[in-house]
Amino acid sequence: DLLVIGSANADLVIGVERRPGPGETVLGSDLAVHPGGKGANQAVAAARLGARTALLARVGDDAYGRLLLDAQRAAGVDTGGVLVGGAPTGVALITVDPDGDNSIVVSPGANGKLTPGDVRAARNLFHASRVVSAQLEIPLETVAEAVRSLAPGTRFVLNPSPPRPLPPEVLAACDPLIVNEHEARVIIGDEPVGDEPADWARILLARGPRSVVVTLGARGALVASTQGAALVPAVKVDPVDTTGAGDAFTAALAWRLGQGDALADAAAYAARVGAASVTKAGAQGSYPTPEEVAAL
Ligand code: ADP
């Protein structure tokens, strides 16, 4: 039902007292290795909710690639579309300081080798999907080819992260375009814009998407289309770790849209999933089952 096309990364995390300066070495905590990457996160989040989910991605022919594939399979994701080889598996080198602030270096590796040709070769996955969900940790030309490959009636959901300016054909396909504040500002670009999410949504809608969702962290999400805009309030929780909340939100929203929910209803469900995910540490490990969503 849901096809996620996007990145898969191994997140390598070390806690540090402080970051090294140029030429300096510091000692840190034991290494933790977690499956990550926005595409892989979304696929796991959707599958854990019970969605029939396939992932179109590329990993290296190496130990991290096998770790990522194992995590997808354990969550119940169809990994038939995960391609292997061409470059080492994508990696994020993450240091976390005592304040909880991250510094991250990403090596896209195999994610950068997911090509428009790979998308064309996955035609059967596109035809089997009601919703296709993408992000921007893979080449933009690959996302554009995904838009061209949509079967009639298939809905396209895009979280443009990390953000960059988008071509009109990609913007026009989004239903919705899902952005946080930072992503909204980058995509809006030079056009003057104030501090009101409703204004960002109005400006973004004028660029072509059929609908726009602005996620606002603990304030919830703004849902906007030509029908008007509405705030979906956040569910009150004690946040432990907000890593991957946006990916959980997007996955839940995409799945519920494919199940026939109206956008506002899908966003309300997604807000519950996003809230549940911030009550646990990590990204994929924090994603809730339907029972955990219901218990919120
Ligand atoms: P991103 O990680 O992309 O910046 P957000 O932080 O806006 O995305 O989180 C996505 C969604 O997850 C929010 O719209 C909200 O519904 C939910 N969420 C995130 N943080 C919290 C929080 N602290 N409390 C409750 N819900 C949250």
Image (cartoon, rainbow, N blue to C red):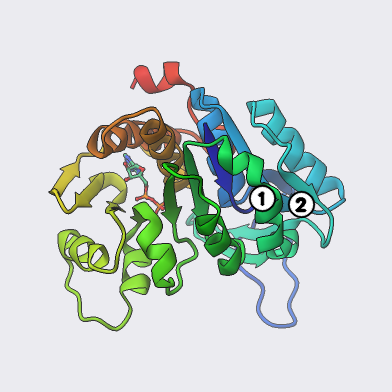
Is residue 5 shown above or below 54? below
The one of 41 and 113 positioned closer to us in this rendering = 113
Crowding at mark 1 (Cα within 10 Å: few <14, some 14-19, many 20+): many
The answer to whether one can see residue 160 in this image is yes
Determine the quadrant in which ligand 1 lies. Answer: top left
Q: Helix, strand or loop at disc 1?
A: loop
The one of 25 and 183 positioned closer to us in this rendering = 183
Mark 1 touches mark 2? (CB < 8 Å): yes
Could you say where residue 86 lies in the image, as x and y percent from the top left? 83, 61
Could you say where residue 138 lies in the image, as x and y percent from the top left? 61, 62
- The yes-or-no answer for disc 2 within 8 Å of ligand 1 is no
- The yes-or-no answer for disc 1 within 8 Å of ligand 1 is no
Is 48 left or right of 210, judged from the image as shown?
A: right
Query: Would you name the residue on which mark 1 appears?
Result: 8
Is 191 left or right of 74, judged from the image as shown?
A: left
| Residue 48, quarter of picture | top right
Crowding at mark 2 (Cα within 10 Å: few <14, some 14-19, many 20+): many
Is 251 left or right of 28, judged from the image as shown?
A: left
Residue visible at 52% across and 36% down in the picture: 2
Which residue is most to the front?
Answer: 152
The one of 175 and 189 positioned closer to us in this rendering = 175
Could you say where residue 143 lies in the image, as x and y percent from the top left? 55, 60
Query: Would you name the residue on which mark 2 appears?
Result: 59
The one of 172 and 184 positioned closer to us in this rendering = 172
Residue visible at 16% across and 59% down in the picture: 198
Quadrant where the image shows the C terminus? top left
Q: Helix, strand or loop at disc 2?
A: strand
Is residue 246 shown above or below 86? above
Q: Amino acid at mark 1?
A: Ala
The answer to whether one can see residue 244 in this image is no
| Residue 189, quarter of picture | bottom left
Residue visible at 36% across and 66% down in the picture: 182
